[in-house]
Image: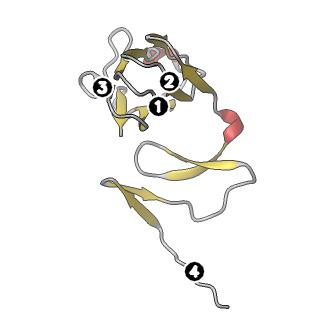
Amino acid sequence: MSSSVLTVDKLKSGGSTFSIPTTDGDNGNVLVTNGSGILSFADIENYTVVTVNSATYSVQTTDTIIEVIYDGDCSLTLPEISSFSQPVKKYLISRTSETGNVHILASGTDVINAGAFSISSINQGVNVYISAAGQWRCLL
């Protein structure tokens, strides 16, 4: 029996191209994105998973993965960008509820993609991060 190897340096999904790491991660690592198409390995222990089952939730600076299971419209308010010591915070927000939309809102004078952002499809996720321009960015 012979085996084959497929070697690639990039993956494309839904119009986004991702650069993959050239080395293996450590045991227990997961692939994460920097929000600009670069994948790297990270320790899953550094991630905090939060399940939201209410109409409103104030995202905490320590949250990382947010799963919305609330059936109905839900509003998530991001923390103020100024509350971070360095602007590298990223969130993965997903909606697994059957009904309603997830509205992602900024705090204070912070901006999201120059406006509001919503997740309307079940099992849809979005990466939320602070851009180099100091604004929240949401990428499907």
Image check: 40 left or right of 114? right
Name the image quarter holding the C terminus.
top left
Q: State how far apart marks 3 and 4 are (Cα).
A: 41 Å
Q: In the image shown, does 57 or 25 lie closer to the viewer?
A: 57
Labelled pair 1, 2 in contact (Cβ < 8 Å): yes
Residue occupying image coordinates x 67% and y 56% = 25
> In the displayed image of the protein, which residue is found farthest to the bottom?
1
Q: State how far apart marks 3 and 2 are (Cα).
A: 18 Å
Q: State how far apart marks 3 and 1 are (Cα).
A: 17 Å
Residue occupying image coordinates x 53% and y 27% = 66
**Residue located beneath label 1 in the image:** 96
**Residue located beneath label 2 in the image:** 69
Mark sitting earlier along the chain (3/1): 1
Establish if 109 lies above or below 133.
Answer: above
Q: Secondary structure at mark 2?
A: loop
Residue 24 spot, x, y in % from top left: 66, 62
Q: Secondary structure at mark 3?
A: strand
Mark sitting earlier along the chain (4/1): 4
Mark sitting earlier along the chain (1/2): 2
- Mark 4 vs mark 2, foreground winner is 2
Q: State how far apart marks 4 and 1 are (Cα).
A: 35 Å
Number of marks in picture: 4
- Label disc, if present, on residue 5 of the rendered structure: 4
Amino acid carrying mark 1 in the image: Thr
Residue 122 spot, x, y in % from top left: 39, 34
Mark sitting earlier along the chain (4/2): 4
Label 2: few (<14), some or many (≥20) within 10 Å? some
> In the displayed image of the protein, which residue is found farthest to the right?
27
Label 4: few (<14), some or many (≥20) within 10 Å? few
Amino acid carrying mark 3 in the image: Phe
Mark sitting earlier along the chain (3/2): 2
